[in-house]
Amino acid sequence: MDRMGVSPGIPQAHWAVAMVIGVAAIVLNLPLGYAREGFRRFSLGWFVCVHLSIPLIAYLRLANHVSAWAIPAFVGCALLGQLAGGRVRRCRRARA
């Protein structure tokens, strides 16, 4: 059976599940990044907005038996969502 470039040892289903979890991390962090822009940097509210999605993403990873190889990708997706949400808030503030 041809695996079409998928690395050996990682089943194809895990790639699909990892992609769904990554998209969930981005979508979940968009409103958190938007809210984070309203707080002073390194304040309690800022800290909560940055870290609130971590338990849910970890739960999704563990419940779907996705191994630790995907953690850096999930962190990157969460960071992308935070940055995009923050940019939306800055752009809306600049227009007002």
Image (cartoon, grey):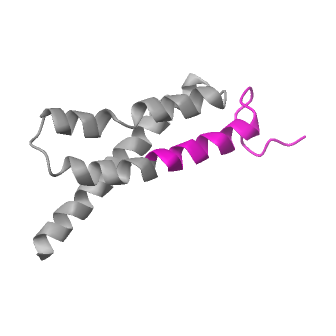
Residue displayed at 47% across by 37% down: 74
Identify the image quadrant of residue 49: top left
Please give left or right for residue 48 compared with residue 14 in the image: left
Residue displayed at 61% across by 24% down: 67
Task: Tell me, yes or no, if residue 2 can be seen here.
Answer: yes
Please give left or right for residue 80 compared with residue 58 in the image: left
Task: Residue 10: say if magenta.
Answer: yes
Q: Where residue 91 sits in the image (x, y, percent)?
A: 19, 68
Q: Where residue 68 sits in the image (x, y, percent)?
A: 55, 23
Range of the magenta residues?
1-25
Q: Can you name the residue that lies furthest to the right here? A: 1
| Front in this rendered view, residue 17 or 49 | 49
| Front in this rendered view, residue 35 or 95 | 35
Residue displayed at 43% across by 44% down: 77
Q: Where residue 94 sits in the image (x, y, percent)?
A: 11, 70
Please give left or right for residue 46 compared with residue 26 in the image: left
Quadrant in which the C terminus appears: bottom left
Quadrant in which the N terminus appears: top right
Q: Where residue 39 sits in the image (x, y, percent)?
A: 13, 45
In the displayed structure, 68 sits above or below 77; it is above
Task: Residue 53: say if magenta.
Answer: no
Please give left or right for residue 12 compared with residue 83 in the image: right
Task: Tell me, yes or no, if residue 66 can be seen here.
Answer: no
In the displayed structure, 27 sits above or below 13; it is below
